Image: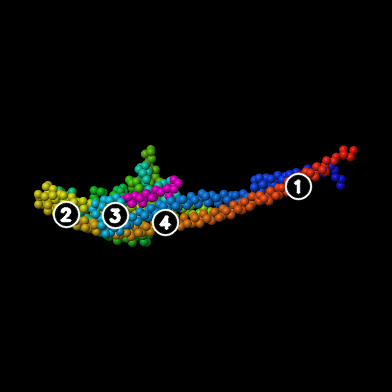
Amino acid sequence: MRVTNQMVTSGSLRNMQKAMQRVNDLNQQVTTGKKISAPSDDPVIAIRALKLRTTCDQLNQFKTKNVQDAKSWVDTTQSSIQNVFDRLQDVYYYCEEGANDPFQTKDRKTIVNELQSLKDAIYREGSSTYAGRYLFSGFKTETNLVFQDAESRKGISYDIAENISPTAFEERNVVLNEVKANDLDAYLDGSKAYQIPEQEGVYRIRLAYNNLSDESISIKMTAADDQESFILATTLKSSESEEYYKVGDNDVHFIPETGELIFGKDVYNSVKNAQNIEVNYSKTNFAVGDLRPEMYFDCTMHQRQMDGSVKDTKFTMNPGGQKIQYEVNFNQYITVNAEGNEFITHDMGNKINDLARAVQDVQDVEDNIARLKIMREDPQYKNSAEAVQRIDRMLEDANTELSMKSETMQKLFGNNMTNFQNFMEDVGTVQARVATTYSKLELIETRVTEQLANFRELKSSNEDIETEEAAIEMYQSELVYEASLSTTASVIKKTLLDYL
């Protein structure tokens, strides 16, 4: 085959171009540090790079965002739960002290205020937030667990369905026919009959809220055989306070001010073995710090609108709870929230209120005795033998009343030692679960960090070049290119004119 100058020239240019392209490719690798600059350079490396980069980005998201956010949420939750535990422990210490009644008259008001402060502190933890989201409200992270201000409770009322276990029944000792210094004149002029204070045992259920609407209340009992029956209750107003605990054997008294249901002996015996007691009632006036009903009960909220209409919203409790989960690794989710209804309950506040009221009752009797003693020296009465005799009798009965109420207070504090131990155990259970979640997150963080390091190494191995090898190879390619330039120049410089 005849080889022409054109063929030599074309072949030389083509080969020099390839050599130059090779030098350019290697120079691109050295300057960028990457094996390829475009997917077309090597589709296999490009596809693998996309997968590895996506994986690294996801792992980095898990490590720097999701896991850290979850840890912060759980850490804040732990602090709030610990605060609740500490406040319950403070109440427990008061119960230990109150069981021996070392309180002085001048201390009782302080103790009442301190108990109320502890209750407020417990419920205040329900308002804890993380990054603007309420921690203990389940999915309703924009809604506080409690009514935090007047605006949040404005124009709303609730119809509440509260399920109560028969084990919630309490047998309480109450004092009837309390001695009241203000009634002295009525006793003296005969407009009021004097009655001797006496102690009575009653069976009580305490509803979640007090200061309830005085409308009719519905009490439905479900027996062990699933048979349902309704119990009628008599609603007593504040003007009938002396009759609150004077309940007949077949009667039930509903006291809206205190949220108490007082059962007569026979009614109690008929319901104490029930499977469940459902009480439906309404509440309109909420106080700042009250727990929101929708976080605890099936209920309907009635909210008055600006135009005067009423918007009804129905809430139903989810038996499985409302779990907020973070994805912290591939297809791995972890629950970060604890719901307020797991460890902040109405029963805590109600029992603290009972303690405070028991202390207040004793203080009221002591104040009443002090007032009677002052009245005995008042010229209006001390010159009247009948008045002195009546005051002396009232003082004697008031001291008896003081003994009864002091004994009731001591027993109440003593019994509540067990109740608050149980509360602390419940909080401790939630606390342990949250602590376990935090430990899991730390392990997951370590695992994700290791995975990220491994995949980054794979990504680097797939995409990045060995700079030393690439530099040497580029140098060799440059030598080849320069040699091709020199050789080609010497071969194609002779033309036909050289032979003429």
Q: Which residue is mark 2?
A: 395
Spatial separation of the CA atoms under disc 3 and disc 2: 25 Å
Mark earlier in primary sequence (4, 3): 3
Mark earlier in primary sequence (1, 2): 2
Spatial separation of the CA atoms under disc 4 and disc 3: 26 Å
Q: Amino acid at mark 1?
A: Val
Spatial separation of the CA atoms under disc 4 and disc 2: 51 Å
Can residue 293 be seen in this snapshot? no
Q: Are marks 1 and 4 in contact (CB under 8 Å)?
A: no
Few, some or many C-alpha atoms within 10 Å of disc 3 (few <14, some 14-19, many ≥20)?
A: many
- Span of residues in magenta: 116-135
In terms of depth relative to the viewer, which is nearer, 156 or 432?
432
Mark earlier in primary sequence (4, 2): 2
In terms of depth relative to the viewer, which is nearer, 127 or 224?
127
Instruction: Residue 171: give x, y in percent of width and height.
Output: 28, 59
Few, some or many C-alpha atoms within 10 Å of disc 2 (few <14, some 14-19, many ≥20)?
A: many
Q: Which residue is mark 4?
A: 431
Residue at image position (36%, 59%) is 422
Q: Amino acid at mark 2?
A: Leu
Magenta segment includes 118: yes
Residue at image position (43%, 51%) is 76
Mark earlier in primary sequence (1, 4): 4
Spatial separation of the CA atoms under disc 1 and disc 2: 122 Å
Look at the picture and state if 151 lies above or below 267: above
Q: Which residue is mark 3?
A: 355
Instruction: Residue 73: give x, y in percent of width and height.
Output: 45, 51
Few, some or many C-alpha atoms within 10 Å of disc 4 (few <14, some 14-19, many ≥20)?
A: many
Residue mark closest to the camera, 4 vs 3: 4
Secondary structure of the residue carrying tag 4 is: helix
Left or right: residue 30 versus residue 439 is right
Q: Which mark is residue 480?
A: 1
